[in-house]
Amino acid sequence: MPALTINGNTTTLDVPDDMPLLWALRDVAGLTGTKFGCGVALCGACTVHLDGQAIRSCITPVSSAVGKQIVTIEAVGNDPVGAKVQDAWRQIDVVQCGYCQSGQIMSATALLKTTPKPSDSDIDNAMSGNICRCGTYGRIRHAIKIAAAK
């Protein structure tokens, strides 16, 4: 049974080592903010942080997360950068349907932690793997710029 550190808490989950982290988080740990989108790492809805890096949890086996820090949307606001991103999202009402937004926020937070003042190109590169079917890309870019300016 793998021991995982999720949002600062270490817990042992009764799951196979090869189970996708997404399902361990959602179905076993009960953290449903991370969404299932495509299952093949193309849409970004399942993005979480693993040791500070934005990763696609739908293709990451639980065994790859053992001994590392996992942060999900439920706790990203505990980080000052994550809190700025969430505040910017609320400030300009980025969300339309909202399904992809946890992944968008996780990717945006990871970007701002490594590149505090991103260019448009930096934003495009960091966010390119996150799909928003509602087309809120303009508001997402604007929110990232607001968060970066804080």
Image (spheres, grey):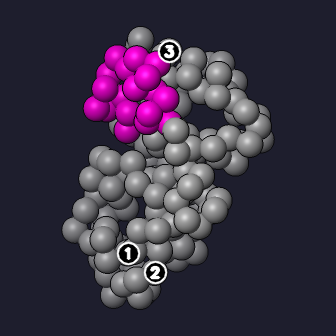
The answer to the question of whether label 1 and label 2 lie on touching residues, with beta carbons closer than 8 A, is yes
Q: Nearer the viewer, residue 15 or 110?
A: 110
Q: Secondary structure at mark 2?
A: loop
Q: Which residue: 46% across, 19% down?
A: 120
Q: Which circle's residue, 2 or 3, is located before the other in the chain?
A: 2
Which x, y percent locates residue 3?
A: 30, 77
Q: Nearer the viewer, residue 123 or 76?
A: 123
In the rendered structure, find residue 146 and report the number of the disc placed on it: 3
Q: What's the residue type where badge 2 is placed?
A: Met
Which x, y percent locates residue 88?
A: 55, 22
Cα distance between the residues tagged 2 and 3: 37 Å
Q: Which residue is mark 2?
A: 19
Q: Is residue 34 left or right of residue 119?
A: right
Q: Which circle's residue, 3 or 1, is located before the other in the chain?
A: 1
Q: Which residue: 30% across, 71% down?
A: 64
Q: Which residue: 31% across, 77% down?
A: 63
Which x, y percent locates residue 114?
A: 28, 32
Q: Residues within 10 Å of mark 3 (few under 14, many from 20)?
A: some
Q: Secondary structure at mark 1?
A: helix
Give the quadrant of residue 96.
Answer: top right
